[in-house]
Amino acid sequence: MSQFSPPACPVPHEGADRILLAHGEGGRLMRRLIRDVFLPALDHPQLRARADGACLPPVEGTPVVSTDSFVVSPLFFPGGSIGSLAVYGTVNDLAVCGAEPLYISVAWIVEEGLPVAVLSRIVEDLARAARTCAVSVVTADTKVVPNGAADQVFLTTTGIGRLRPGIQWDVQRVCVGDRIVVSGPIGDHGIAVLAARGTLGLELDLASDSAPLHELIGATLAHSPGVHFVRDPTRGGVAAVLHEVTEAAQVTLEIEEAAVPVRDPVRSACEILGLDPLYVACEGRLVAFVSPESASSIVRLLQSHPLGLRAASIGQVTGRGLAEVHVRSPLGALRVLDEPAGAPLPRIC
Amino acid sequence: MRYLDEYRDPRLAARLLDELRRTVSRPWTIMEVCGGQTHTLLRSGLEQLVPRGLSMVHGPGCPVCVTPQETIDRALLIAAQPGVIFCSFGDMLRVPGSEGNLLEARARGADVRIVYSPLDAVQIARQHRDRQVVFFAVGFETTAPATALAARQARLWQVTNFSLLVAHVLVPPAMEAILQAPDNQVQAFLAPGHVCTITGFEAYCDLAARYRVPIVVTGFEPVDLLEGILWAVRQLEAGRYRVENQYARSVRRQGNREAQQVVAEVYEVCDRTWRGLGMLAQSGLKLRDAYADLDAERRFALPPSRSKENAECRSGDVLRGRIRPPDCPAFGTRCTPEHPLGAPMVSSEGACAAYWHYARRQAVGSRS
């Protein structure tokens, strides 16, 4: 089990100290849960109005919507929790589309029997993450399912953002010669979550990289000419992003293995477990395809931001037509990087 | 990172490659026995870099690959029994049996769990006294000490709901079977470093002498493999045949005595069927009579096996080094990791998987 146990002192809550099926059934217990757990943390006029939906002011420019579900196990891990992950994950999906995040909705599936204190802590993490990103939680829903029908808490968040003016990032703009840039060391999230499960006896000095990317993007890529496409590597890691791009743009990519930034604890864990860091999930990194002329200035710009200190150019688009990803080994030989298959690390986000 | 970077050093590798080019005067065929070595060769691209004429063929040293279909079928039958928790190393889950694999059994409701240590399975048995917990004891001499320790521990803790489905195999008899084949091409071996860490390399000295074949006990990093190949080629060029220990940072001549003792306490040598190689005398391990109550095959009344290996799968030829995976007509077409005909396509140490993951383009391209 996780070493990140819930707080010893439960948040005062009238009635049960564990979630009951009745908490999801619209009656008195549900109203108390909203009053005592959700509203104090997620205070917003739209939520307080308790309508079935939120009426939002008009969005200037192009609105962008994204939705994502979160089933991470354990709920709390070094560097975050399912609460913060659910906000940053959706914020990042908006951010890599080139949007500024504005609003978010949250749907909760809660397993009967979950301690209310654990739910409170997740709500607080989620609220804190939303404040960090300056996004408002404007509508929410909670369902409780019988014991065993879900594992503790599953979250779905939907975000609404506004496309930053002038941005036209599109996978179809990826072209031969483009450089492939990552914003920092890869695989931290996947390995940190795996270690937090405590089942492998791994003791690592490592936290998840879970972080919102919209500020990093706003301060760097949003103003840089030459950015063609941006994506955040989550499940399936950087390899999954590279394969999406080869497939969609029908291009061949070549990655310089020695140039890929990987922290030592991630390398060690991957060596022990037989994993390739290129397949391990990140939750606070981006992969950008940029023109060759702009690549070095973009890497320098990313490195000037706290979230991009170890940004690096890791490869380039080498050809058109053959949708493959190749990796140049440190010895100079070329191999194929296969598409992620199956789930080496299930329930990582 | 210490103990890794120095064995992946590109400059050192380049020096060894130069030395190798200067040493090779004619074509040689060398087999790396272990699947882990095969994967390093393919992943680092060494196969493309060694001098032309030096042919690396891939050996039977992937325990998942050589586990016969009937054993997989037995695993599937046991896993499907009500109340059973079936524990296995993750590698076995995608290996096809006659009807599906363990992952599909799990999707149908069987309680199949991946563990990283056999002792974890004993712990699971302690936590679930009302369930039967079975561990799939697959592997060479490297894994046998860990499963033997699990058996000893289960006895010590009186965990009576724990048993082992044993499919352990031994490396030297497989090497001997390859050497005895009339069409054998292998002229030298890179012996598996981790197996020798446990067993030492006395048994290999006997093989080297009887079959006049150079054997180099070799590690698993690119520099290890290059050095192992270089030493083997030097012997071949000089007409020598003895055992050399390249993996001296891990392997001692006598091996690990404690590990050998626990294996000898729990297991005895027996005849065993290998996928692709057939029945090999004295090539496996089975539980001794004193531990027979931990034998899952006795505990569960299983019907007689009617397993048949897929006739199209040429894994037997791959495992003997007769063909390389891309030479199989089904490779990459009717046999892929999603729809494997045989275990070498899905095991993390399988030669077919190594070609599929790292060298598919060259492999498929070379055939067309």
Image (spheres, coloured by chain):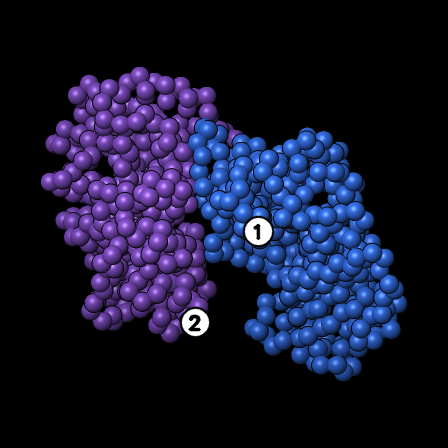
User: Camera-side residue: B214 or A316?
Assistant: A316
Residue B216: which disc? none
Q: Is residue A264 above or below residue A62?
A: above
Q: What's under tag 1, amino acid-wise?
A: Ala
Picture quadrant of residue A4: bottom right
Picture quadrant of residue A71: bottom right
User: Camera-side residue: A192 or A337?
Assistant: A337
Whether labels 1 and 2 belong to a single chain: the reply is no
Q: Position of residue A129 (x, y in %)?
A: 76, 54
Q: In the image, what residue occupies the spot 28% across and 40% down?
A: B58
Q: In the image, what residue occupies the spot 27% across and 37% down?
A: B57
**For chain A, what colour was chosen?**
blue
Q: Position of residue B235 (x, y in %)?
A: 22, 22
Residue A248: which disc? 1
* Chain letter of the residue carrying label 1: A
Q: In the image, what residue occupies the spot 76% across and 79% down?
A: A29
Q: Which chain is purple?
A: B
Residue on which the image places disc 2: B109
Label 1 to label 2, Cα distance in Å?
A: 37 Å
Q: Position of residue B49 (x, y in %)?
A: 37, 28
Neighbour class for label 2 at 10 Å: few (<14), some, many (≥20)? few
